[in-house]
Image: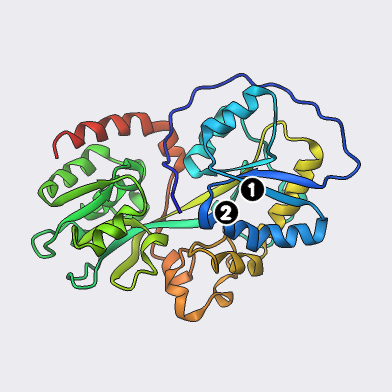
């Protein structure tokens, strides 16, 4: 499963009001989502019980993007009731007026982690960015070790996305997890430059990091958890990792009947038993604090929200990136010229 970059350039497009005739009975509703196993997990965990209870078929299409959402609204044809957005793109969509506020009273969800219960989006799936390494390599205990190329020799692969990289350099430079934001980008880039001889690859696709490790082209990597936790030749740690969320959002101007149906789908996404079924498809987890007992005990360490993992991670600050991403990205491009 690919993960969408936090910061995507966007310009406001005019909003067009769409009026559809009310139908006697809603039989089908569309969703734009990320595709792959993530989409399959929506079918298995949430669409199935939603359809069984309401008789409404959920039709998925992919991939999702902010540009696609903008184009749909600008065209005046609201073809999908909902869209999946990363935490940063959700903030952008909110500022551009592309998504509706959620009616949490109508959703009436089961207990959720607070960061997943957003005014404009339902945080349905956690994923983590973590450190990983070949089992034959010396195991780092923390980000200080990961950046210590003398005592932990080997090539590194890091994401070519500052939103998934910069904070780890600050952790390695001694900044506590709870003091990361506002990010000191210059300090982080200076720390990264201190190991530039050992940064072998800046990866863009999530599949690259585990493949580079398996091929022994690099010995250590920053990777998305779902890509590495089930690889038998790789080791990993959630300690100091970054937890982030994918959100399902209701499209601005979606017909009232579809918005009401979405509230029922959101409820199904809050049910821990449904989240457990979704986690059986992909090693990412939903927002229920009661999920751990429902997950396979022998695989609990793979999941981002397992208590032992969630307690040692920090949560991405999408609001900071929405405000500062353009400046950080410019500095990142300059940094890359020094590698």
Say left or right for 299 vs 240: right
- Residue 39's disc number: 2
Report the residue that reaches farthest toward the bottom: 298
Relative depth, front residue between 160 and 2: 2
Q: Position of residue 113 (x, y in %)?
A: 57, 59
**Where 259 falls versus 275 (above or below)?**
above
Say left or right for 309 vs 161: right
**Where 95 falls versus 168 (above or below)?**
above
Which label's residue is closer to the chain start, 2 or 1? 2
Secondary-structure class at tag 2: helix
Instruction: Kindly indicate whether the residue at mark 1 contacts the one at mark 2 (C-beta within 8 angstroms).
Output: yes
| Other residues around mark 2 within 10 Å, as few (<14) / some (14–19) / many (≥20) | many
Identity of the residue drawn at 54% across and 73% down = 292
Say left or right for 49 vs 202: right
Q: In terms of image quadrants, where is residue 166? A: top left
Relative depth, front residue between 131 and 56: 56
Q: Position of residue 61 (x, y in %)?
A: 61, 44
Report the residue that reaches farthest toward the top: 14
Q: In terms of image quadrants, where is residue 95? A: top right
Identity of the residue drawn at 80% across and 37% down = 256
Using the rendered image of the protein, determine whether residue 105 is visible from the camera's viewpoint. Answer: no
Q: Which residue is mark 1?
A: 60
Report the residue that reaches farthest toward the left: 150
Say left or right for 25 vs 293: right
Q: Position of residue 233 (x, y in %)?
A: 28, 72
Identity of the residue drawn at 75% across and 52% down = 57
What is the image's colouring?
rainbow
Identity of the residue drawn at 61% across and 57% down = 42
Q: Position of residue 199 (x, y in %)?
A: 17, 49
> Number of marks in the image?
2
């Amino acid at each position: 499963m690919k993960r969408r970059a936090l910061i995507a350039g966007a310009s406001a497009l005019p909003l067009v009001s769409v009026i559809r005739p009310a139908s006697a009975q809603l039989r089908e509703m569309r969703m734009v989502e990320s595709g792959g196993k993530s989409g399959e997990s929506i079918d298995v965990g949430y669409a199935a019980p939603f359809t069984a209870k309401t008789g409404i078929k959920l039709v998925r299409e992919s991939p999702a993007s902010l540009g696609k959402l903008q184009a749909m609204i600008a065209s005046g044809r609201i073809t999908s009731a909902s869209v999946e957005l990363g935490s940063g793109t959700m903030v952008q969509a909110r500022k551009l007026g592309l998504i509706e506020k959620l009616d949490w009273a109508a959703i009436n969800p089961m207990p959720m982690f607070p960061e997943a219960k957003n005014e404009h989006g339902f945080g349905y799936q956690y994923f983590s960015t973590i450190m990983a390494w070949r089992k034959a390599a010396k195991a780092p205990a923390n980000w200080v070790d990961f950046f210590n190329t003398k005592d932990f020799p080997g090539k590194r692969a890091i994401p070519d996305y500052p939103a998934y990289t910069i904070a780890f350099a600050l952790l390695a430079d001694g900044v506590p997890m709870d003091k990361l934001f506002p990010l000191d980008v210059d300090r982080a880039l200076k720390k990264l430059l201190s190991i530039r001889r050992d940064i072998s690859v800046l990866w863009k696709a999530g599949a690259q990091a585990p493949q580079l490790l398996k091929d022994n082209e690099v010995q250590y990597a920053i990777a998305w958890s779902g890509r590495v936790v089930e690889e038998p030749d790789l080791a990993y740690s959630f300690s100091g990792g970054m937890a982030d969320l994918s959100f399902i959002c209701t499209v601005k101007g979606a017909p009232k009947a579809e918005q009401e149906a979405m509230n029922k789908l959101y409820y199904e996404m809050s049910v821990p038993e449904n989240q457990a079924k979704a986690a059986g498809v992909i090693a990412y987890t939903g927002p229920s604090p009661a999920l751990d007992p429902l997950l396979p005990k022998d695989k609990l360490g793979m999941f981002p929200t397992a208590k032992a993992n969630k307690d040692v991670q920090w949560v991405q600050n999408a609001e900071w990136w929405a405000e500062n991403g353009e400046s950080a990205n410019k500095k990142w491009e300059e940094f890359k010229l020094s590698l």
